[in-house]
Structures are given as C-alpha cells and as structure tokens.
Image (cartoon, rainbow, N blue to C red):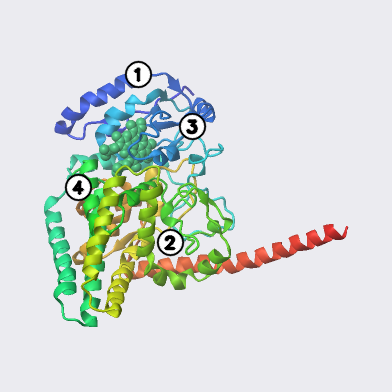
Amino acid sequence: MPPRTPSPSPFLMPASPAAGAKAMPAALLAEKRRGRLPACTAAELRRRIGGGEYLVIIDGLVCKLNAFVNKHPGGPLAIMHMVGHDATDEVRSMHPLDVLETAVPRWAVARFVADAKAEGVMSHVEDMDLAYSAARSSPNDGSSHAQPPTTTGADLDYPAIQRDFRLLDVQLRAAGLYQCNYSAYAFEAVRYVALFITAVGLLLYGPVSAWTYLAAGISTALLWQQLSFFAHDLGHNELTGNRNFDMVLGICVADLLGGLSVGWWKKNHNTHHIVTNDVDNDPDIQHLPFFAVSTRFFESRYSTYYRRVMEFDAAARLFVSVQDKMYYIIMCFARYNLYFLSWNYLLFSDFAPFRTLEICCIGIFFTWFSWLLSHIPSWPYLALYVLVSHSASAVLHIQITLSHFAMSTESPDPVHECFAARQVRTTMDVICPRALDWFHGGLQFQIEHHLFPRLPRHNLLLVQPLVKDLCRKHRMEFKEFSFVDGNIYTLQWMGEVASRVKLFNARKEHEDQAVAALRKAIVEL
Ligand code: HEM
C-alpha cells in the first residue's frame, strides 16, 4: 500500500465564512510549508526519537521540539508526555487557534506519512524506553488489576470517534460557543461579593458567639469554593482567551483571596488534562500514602510528575486499607496540604512563570487573613472559625475528586486510543438541578470540560447533549451520577481497592517468609 498523507484536519478548515476569511492565510501558509517538508514514516520517527529527538506529531506535521521544550509557555512536561504521539487533539485542547496555525508549523521538520501499519496509531513509542511518553496510558494487560465496571468495549472505532469529535469542535467554534458569556460572570461576581461581605462582616461586627464563627467559617469555605471555580476558568483562559491577563486575574483571585498558588494549580492541572487518570503521570490521582484509586499503586510506581517513587510502604498500606472510611475525614484537611504544595512550588519549582507576583500576593493574603483573625476575641472561637472554614472546604475537594477517582485508569488500547475516547473513559459528569449549577461551578460537566477545556464554563450545558450523542453513536459509556450516587459509587470503588490491600499484605507476608527461609537455608549451607 502506498504511504498515506493524513488529510488536513478540520481545525484548519474555516468554520464560517467570517472565521475563514481570518483563518485562511495562516492555514494556507501551513499547507504550503507542509508540501515543502520531507516525509517521515513511523519507523523513521521512532529511529529519530531513539536518537534523542523530541518529535511530536501535530496536525500531520512532525515537530522537533528540542530547542523549544524549555521555553514552552505550557512547561516542558506537557511536551515530554507527547513525544512520539499524535498530539493534535491535546494541542488543540490547550492552545488558542493561532498557536496551531502559526506557531506550530514553525517547528515542523517533516510531514508524517503513515504506512498501513501505523494508520490510526496515536502512540508510536509505547514499547520504547522513554522517561515520559512511553509510560503514558498504562495498558489494561488483563492482569489481576481491578478496573471500575464500564459498558464501553475495547472494540471502538477510534478514527471515527476522532473524526466526529473534531467536527464537533469545529461546530462549537462556528456556533460561537468559545465566546465567554460575560453576563453570567456578573451574577457570579455578585455571589462572590455577597459571600465576602458576609464572612468579613460576621468576623468584624457579628455578636460574639459560636454561631457567628460557625456561619463565618461556612461563608468563607463557600467563598473559597466559588473563587476556586472562577480560578479554574481563568487557568484555562476561558474568560478572555489572553493567557497573561487571565493568569494575573487568577492570581488576584486564588493567591490574594485564597492563599493558594494558581501557578502550582495550573502546572498540576494541565498535566492532569494531558494524561488524565494515568497512574504514573497524573498528579490528580497520586495521593499516597492516603489514597490509591488503582491496585497498580501497590507496585510503588514512579511518578513522572513528582519525580520520585510513590512508595506503597507500611503507612500507605494502613491508610489505603481504610481509605473508603477515611475519605471524608482526610478531605477535611486537604486545604492545609494545598498551602504546603503552593509554597513548595513557588520556592522550588523550576517552572514558575509568575513566581515573584505569586509570592507577594500569597504574602498579602496571610497578612490580611491574620489581621482578620486578630479580631476574633478568644482562642476557642478562633480555632472554631479556622477549623470550620478549612474543613468545609472538603466539599470542593470531594467535588474535584468525584469526577475521576472511580473512573478507568487503564486503557484497553493505548496505542490507538484517541484523545476523545480517553477523556470519556476517565471522566464522569454529575447530574444536578439547574438551580444548583452554581454550587458545582462547572465541575458537573466534567466530560465536556475535558473534551473542550478552553470552552467557557457557562456554555458547557449547551454542549452536553452533543457529547452524549457522540458517545451514543460510538458506544462509549457516558458516566453520570447524582452528587449523592457519585459519592456512593466513588466510596464503593475505593472500598474495593482497600479490600485488595489485605490480599496484598497476605501475599507480601508469604513472600517475606519465603525469602527469610531461603536466606536461612543459604546460611546453613
Ligand atoms: C510546536 C509545538 C508547540 C507550540 C509552538 C506551543 C506553543 C504554546 C504557546 C504559544 C502557549 C501559550 C498559549 C497561550 O498564550 O494561551 C502554549 C501553552 C501551552 N501548551 Fe503548548 N505548544 C506546543 C506544543 C505543546 C504540546 C505538545 C503540548 C501538550 C499537550 C502543549 C501544551 C501546552 C499547555 C498545557 C499550555 C498552557 C496553556 C495555558 O497556559 O493554559 N503544547 N503552548
């Protein structure tokens, strides 16, 4: 069969006459460059990657990113995960269109031509010994590792899913759904201000009673929860599409008003979007010693994000064996850990683009928050307020983890599985009455958000039926639960993993005894 050049992706096609008029010159430029570039087959790609080149396929172009990886505004890790992969959809999901049309072609060194063997292949390096990308999407190897139940089979038509998903994205752009609905944010702003005034008003002017500090604590937790949703939108540049503007606003919201680093969160969260629910690579499911959402964590695996082995040691075995019982209690303390992670990132991370501004803003947060606390007249009331405001923040952490903890962590076909299928497999939605949309802050449309991360939050509701159609058409299970059922489902899954610790312990004890016996026998000899 002759080599096949992939057809231009629909991203380069004009979505509407008006959009086309703007997009065409860049698209034509890219096409022209594409024609001039030498061809690169899958075998050649692997050979060059083996020789140390960071090659990523984006929209049919082979981009060599060795000189760019450390200057990449999204950080080096995002690129490293994609070496040897067709990253067209990941890149589309994370960048404004002009990056795809103008910046990406600048790094192209070849045109990718797939032979019959490499047709429909997403990862060309699964069996290569690379630090990052090869580890991506742990395969479901049919071993004894437990997986949450799913009705999605392994025989999906990934190229067809990819085609329809890309078409859907073009339609959403044409329909103007990537435009932010600013009036929706006006309502959000009223809520933030009301919660702020309630919390501060109660602390400064409320009667001195336990009820006052309880109410102030709950208002503060609600304020932080709502601001986190806003910071999440800003982190994805959903507000203006301008990364620097949205980032600085995000710092004012998260760092100045919440004391947490939005830069830390973005680094963590962007990685999570690229390698969702991957045991070795996704920091959002790497919570040892407290939680393990897959029995694969029992193997003390290496985290490419934290750059250390996640030891499944005695403490981990103890916590994980009761993780379903401890889930809510541990969540009550999660916010303290986020302060630590923020400072750890700001002081030690090699990739912290707004380090100085963030340190100043978090410093200001701790100053004004301490000033506020100084108005609480006694230690017991102060402890009550701090405890309630931080423990009630558990709701946010539960909302965040609910979307992924009980979802698949192993791909049925890591070589061919496309971006859209992976996001649907690893993510779930939460069903809620429309009147409670504000309470879930967009997290209830998590599947839609993972498919289209830059799509403004208030438009996700409109996209949900289209995504459901896509899933129905391609027999992908669209998982959605009410908040209560989602909690039950997650706890059941965590309980299932917890129950496996006993088996693990028994096997380990047996192995330890066998090793001890062998040692003794050797000594006696
Ligand atoms: C030729 C290749 C690439 C180029 C030229 C490029 C360029 C850029 C640029 C210009 C930005 C800033 C975008 C903005 O202003 O909003 C950015 C951000 C980003 N890129 Fe890339 N990129 C490339 C490859 C990749 C790859 C392979 C990934 C992995 C999926 C990736 C993930 C990201 C992420 C996560 C961000 C951060 C987005 C944000 O701040 O919200 N990029 N990239």
Q: Secondary structure at mark 1?
A: helix
Q: Position of residue 188 (x, y in %)?
A: 16, 59
Q: Which mark is residue 461?
A: none
Q: Residues within 10 Å of mark 2 (few under 14, many from 20)?
A: many
What residue is at 59 percent from the left and 69 percent from the top?
502
Task: Give the residue pinned by disc 4.
Answer: 239
Q: Amino acid at mark 1?
A: Gly
Q: Which mark is residue 118?
A: 3
Task: Give the residue pinned by disc 1.
Answer: 35
Q: Position of residue 372 (x, y in %)?
A: 21, 68
The one nearer the camera, 253 or 348, is: 348
What residue is at 25 percent from the left and 23 percent from the top?
28
Q: How far apart in space, not on screen, are marks 2 and 1 (Cα)?
A: 46 Å
Which of the two discs, 3 and 2, labels the residue nearer the N terminus? Answer: 3
Q: How far apart in space, not on screen, are marks 3 and 2 (Cα)?
A: 32 Å
Residue 112 makes an appearance in the image:
yes
Q: Which mark is residue 406?
A: 2
> Closer to the camera: disc 3 or disc 4?
4
What residue is at 21 percent from the left and 24 percent from the top?
25
The one nearer the camera, 193 or 371, is: 371
Which of the two discs, 3 and 4, labels the residue nearer the N terminus? Answer: 3
The one nearer the camera, 255 or 160, is: 255
